[in-house]
Image (spheres, rainbow, N blue to C red):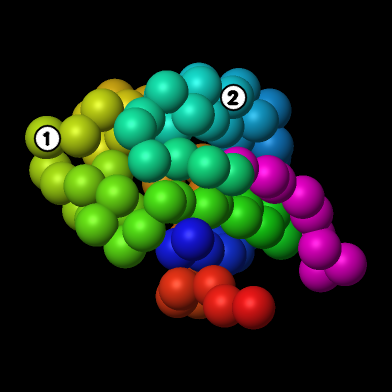
Amino acid sequence: MYLVVSQWEVIPGHEGQFEEIGRKVRAVLLDQKGIELLQTFKNDAGHVIVVHGYTDKAAYENVVNNPRSAFVKALEETRLEDHSRWIGSERGETFE
């Protein structure tokens, strides 16, 4: 599995918009081929942590880095980054 852990900071006063948009983007993401896992939580600093699991790196690339993917279009349409700031992500293949 190709795992991605992203950290987001919600702009103060935009919590409601972020949550509403997050639900929409989550639904689109879960509908994409190659998604095996999607979980979200807040850490102790109040940042939103999103854990994505893909079948492999190729699936990740197709969903996240393909400018024509439904996920990328959903991000553009919902303007998620008007309500939050992406802090960064860690990603890689899992192993046992």
Is residue 32 in the magenta section? no
Vertical position of residue 22 compared to residue 4: above or below: above
Numbered range of the magenta stretch: 38-46
Give the x, y percent position of residue 79: 36, 34
The tag on residue 11 is none
Vertical position of residue 14 compared to residue 31: above or below: below
Give the x, y percent position of residue 26: 53, 30
The residue depicted at 13 percent of the width and 43 percent of the height is 67
User: Which residue position is annotated with label 1?
Assistant: 68
- Amino acid type assigned to the residue bearing label 1 in the image: Arg
- Amino acid type assigned to the residue bearing label 2 in the image: Arg
Asked if one can make out residue 87 in the rendered structure from this viewpoint, the answer is: no
Is residue 39 in the magenta section? yes
Vertical position of residue 86 compared to residue 94: above or below: above
Relative side of 8 to 32, left or right: right
* Circle 1 SS class: loop
* Number of numbered tags placed on the structure image: 2
Asked if one can make out residue 94 in the rendered structure from this viewpoint, the answer is: yes
